[in-house]
């Protein structure tokens, strides 16, 4: 195999990250893997944190309260700025590239793999968390660990789940939400017959569209690339998934191919559809609105149905915390994240996020929030069913660009709406993905 | 003046060269410097950088290296790019023709004697004045798949049974975004042409009427020829605005459904910023330049030709 310039760059990036890692290890006292490393913030240190705009109010309050406690304990001033979630990616990339900006950022998906050599190694913090709290869920770890080193600290999965109207299901003759994809299709047909159809976003919805498309393909065993990064989307499994999507689409409310992230929320709350997939925030917007009390009482939740692969697999949204190497106060930054992501603070934060955020460590999964409301419960499984977006290949430029170009979403939408046959749609997705995963 | 006079006497008495600051050429250059610097920093540099990026594999977060025409080669083989080119041309041509026809018509109407003339003219400008993003969000609701006010009204009247799929069906979506762009662009064309119409001397029309010209003949042989230099300028701008439209599409469809409304500008953004492929995004943006140059050249060498303007042929 001939080495391309890109391979070489990626290679050097890895080497650089490794070098930094070893540097840090030698600079700081040697720790046993299990013991929590302790970092003494630099004299006069102050930090800037840039995070995504919270989706639920409790999240922000709790995050800021924990930050305040950190400041009180260490004297390190921390300024927390926020930015709309879709703007985080370019901002973080520019900060990494330019070498100035916030010291810490909460980023999305495979962002850390876009500039791994610009990030501070946090392996010892991650390893100590992992050994103390039962280890990371593999999906979230995949977004943070490059080789043997952590370039980011997994923070949370923003769970995607099915929300449905119990009364409408009962009218259609279903007392229980189906767990398998084929029964799910039957139920959607029954709901359509009762004029209370299901609806899932097939438009360019960054969150909902990707969640739905990845679930359709993964649940049937299709995947964009194999372990080596070779594009294998044009497979019999994908074709099956697309045939399924075509049948399922015909039970949807009309217009789903134009839906952006917000549309399903509006339609669900207006009572026109019986089933959709969303974060738990949709339930809370009904629950917190006195006018929607009736609907809120009728809302139930569950995980997306399991397909032929036999286990639930989902994309969800994943957020990780990164420290940029350019920070003037690396120890303060490490101490901050170590504090914020430790169990006592995480427990508070997860509780305050009202089931919107699912913790990355198995030892943190037990939280009163999951039983506080029966609708919360399925979202507890987000971290365990989560799969990184570039599955099953390496994360990096190609995985990010493929998702940003909506290759998966377009493929599912083209086949579902009948614009192309499943075979054509899969072939086209293969061509498009190959532009990024250069063959 | 005094300075100039002094210089001249100085020059005649002393054969020495003028002081630098008093030489016409140098002063001219000096005075142009701020404007030139402004242009260089805010126009030439970004444009040059954009063109350069198109020849590199720069990504957000990683400086690129020169890769020649590789981006363009990849785009050439990319069916999505060609779909975006097709969409952009369709969007520009259809919207520009409609904007011109309706805008000219509106201008002719506004040029008649109307009650509350000033008020009506101000109201007509509204679509142009409202920020695109705001009006686009209003339209997003108007075209909503479930809550569209248009569908709702038509269903109440009993003309249709189910909501119109404005932005979900590929053909509907194309028509919808074009009409929305036309709605927004008409005022610009209408008000500018109205200004032109008002410069036409009434005596020309009076003379033609006396000669027995019909109103169509007056329009064809007086109004249109006199207006045509202005039409050329207005339509050049209109084509440029339409070709580079981004906000409307981004709010309404983000290029969907099934990429049927993806324009070159939206595709460029999608690839460059969320996708991180700055080089490729820049290449798509640069690929718009030939089309734009073509439009400008057409209007300058075509529409502004004197013979055409005077109703003759080449």
Image (spheres, rainbow, N blue to C red):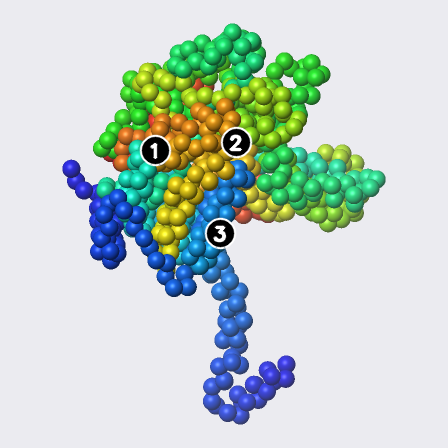
Crowd band around label 3 with a 10 angstrom C-alpha radius: few (<14), some (14–19), many (20+): some
Q: Earlier in the sequence, mark 3 or mark 2?
A: 3
Left or right: A360 with respect to A282? Answer: left
- How many marks do you count on the picture? 3
Asked whether the viewer can see residue B179, the reply is no
**Residue furthest to the left:** A1
Per the model, the C-alpha gap separating discs 3 and 1 is 27 Å
Q: Which residue is mark 2?
A: A281
Instruction: Find residue A68 and name its label.
Output: 3
- Tell me whether marks 3 and 1 sit on the same chain: yes
Q: Which residue is mark 1?
A: A362
Say which chain tag 2 marks: A
Left or right: B203 with respect to B246? Answer: right
Instruction: Find residue A123 and name its label.
Output: none
Q: Residue drawn 32% across and 38% down?
A: A133
Q: Residue drawn 47% across and 31% down?
A: A369
- Tell me whether marks 2 and 1 sit on the same chain: yes
Crowd band around label 2 with a 10 angstrom C-alpha radius: few (<14), some (14–19), many (20+): some
Left or right: A59 with respect to B278? Answer: right
In the structure shown, which secondary structural element does the residue marked by tag 1 occupy? helix
């Amino acid at each position: 195999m001939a080495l391309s310039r890109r391979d070489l760059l990626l290679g050097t990036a890895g080497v650089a990250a490794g070098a930094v890692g070893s540097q840090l290890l030698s600079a700081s006292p040697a720790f046993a893997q299990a013991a929590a490393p302790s970092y003494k913030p630099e004299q006069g240190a102050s930090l800037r944190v840039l995070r995504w705009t919270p989706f639920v109010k409790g999240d922000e309050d709790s995050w800021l309260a924990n930050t305040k406690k950190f400041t009180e304990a260490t004297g390190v001033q921390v300024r927390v700025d926020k930015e709309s979630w879709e703007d985080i990616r370019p901002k973080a990339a520019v900060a990494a590239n330019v070498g100035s900006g916030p010291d810490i950022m909460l980023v999305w998906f495979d962002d850390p793999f876009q500039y791994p050599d610009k990030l501070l190694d946090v392996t010892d913090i991650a390893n100590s968390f992992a050994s103390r709290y039962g280890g990371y869920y593999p999906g979230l770890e995949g977004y943070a660990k490059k080789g043997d080193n952590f370039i980011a600290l997994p923070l949370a999965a923003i769970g995607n789940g099915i929300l449905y109207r119990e009364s409408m299901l009962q009218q259609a003759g279903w007392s229980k939400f189906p767990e398998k994809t084929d029964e799910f299709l039957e139920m959607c047909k029954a709901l359509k017959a009762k004029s209370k159809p299901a609806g899932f976003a097939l438009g360019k919805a960054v969150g909902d569209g990707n969640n739905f498309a990845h679930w359709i393909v993964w649940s049937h065993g299709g995947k964009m690339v194999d372990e080596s990064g070779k594009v294998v989307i044009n497979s019999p499994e994908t074709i099956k998934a697309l045939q399924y999507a075509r049948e399922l689409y015909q039970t949807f409310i009309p217009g789903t191919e134009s839906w952006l992230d917000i549309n399903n929320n509006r339609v669900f709350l207006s009572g026109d559809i019986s089933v959709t997939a969303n974060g738990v925030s949709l339930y809370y917007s009904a629950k917190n609105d006195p006018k929607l009390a009736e609907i809120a009482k009728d809302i139930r939740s569950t995980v997306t149905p399991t397909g032929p692969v036999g286990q639930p697999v989902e994309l969800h949204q994943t957020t990780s915390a990164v420290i940029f190497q350019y920070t003037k106060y690396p120890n303060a930054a490490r101490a901050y994240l170590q504090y914020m992501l430790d169990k006592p603070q995480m427990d508070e934060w997860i509780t305050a996020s009202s089931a919107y955020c699912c913790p990355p460590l198995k030892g943190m999964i037990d939280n009163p929030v999951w039983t506080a409301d029966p609708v919360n419960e399925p979202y507890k499984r987000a971290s365990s069913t989560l799969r990184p977006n570039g599955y099953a290949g390496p994360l990096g430029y190609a995985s990010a660009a493929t998702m940003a170009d909506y290759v998966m979403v377009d493929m599912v939408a083209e086949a579902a709406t009948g614009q192309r046959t499943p075979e054509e749609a899969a072939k086209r997705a293969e061509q498009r993905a190959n532009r990024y995963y250069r063959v | 003046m005094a300075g100039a006079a002094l210089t001249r006497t100085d020059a005649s008495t002393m054969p020495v060269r003028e002081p630098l600051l008093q030489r016409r050429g140098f002063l001219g250059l000096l005075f142009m410097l701020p404007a030139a610097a402004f242009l260089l920093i805010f126009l030439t540099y970004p444009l040059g950088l954009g063109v350069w990026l198109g020849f590199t594999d720069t990504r957000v977060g990683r400086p690129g290296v020169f890769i020649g025409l590789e981006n363009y080669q990849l785009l050439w083989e990319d069916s999505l790019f060609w779909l975006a080119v097709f969409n952009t041309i369709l969007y520009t041509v259809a919207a520009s023709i409609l904007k011109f026809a309706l805008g000219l018509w509106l201008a002719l109407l506004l040029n008649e004697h109307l009650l509350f003339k000033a008020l009506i003219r101000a109201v007509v400008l509204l679509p142009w004045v409202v920020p695109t993003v705001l009006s686009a969000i209003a339209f997003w609701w108007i075209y909503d798949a479930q809550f569209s006010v248009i569908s709702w009204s038509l269903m109440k009247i009993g003309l249709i049974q189910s909501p119109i799929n404005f932005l979900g069906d590929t053909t509907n979506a194309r028509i919808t975004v074009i009409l929305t762009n036309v709605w927004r662009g008409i005022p610009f064309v209408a008000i500018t042409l109205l200004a032109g119409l008002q410069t036409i001397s009434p005596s020309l029309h009076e003379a033609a009427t006396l000669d027995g010209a019909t109103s169509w003949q007056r329009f064809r042989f007086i109004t249109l020829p006199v207006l045509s230099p202005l039409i050329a300028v207005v339509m050049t701008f209109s084509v440029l605005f339409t070709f580079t439209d981004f906000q409307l599409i981004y709010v309404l469809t983000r290029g969907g459904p099934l990429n049927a409304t993806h324009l070159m500008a939206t595709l460029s953004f999608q690839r460059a910023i969320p996708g991180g492929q700055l080089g490729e995004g820049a290449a798509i943006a640069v690929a718009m330049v030939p089309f734009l140059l073509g439009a400008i050249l057409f209007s300058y060498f075509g529409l502004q030709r004197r013979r055409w303007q005077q109703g003759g042929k080449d």
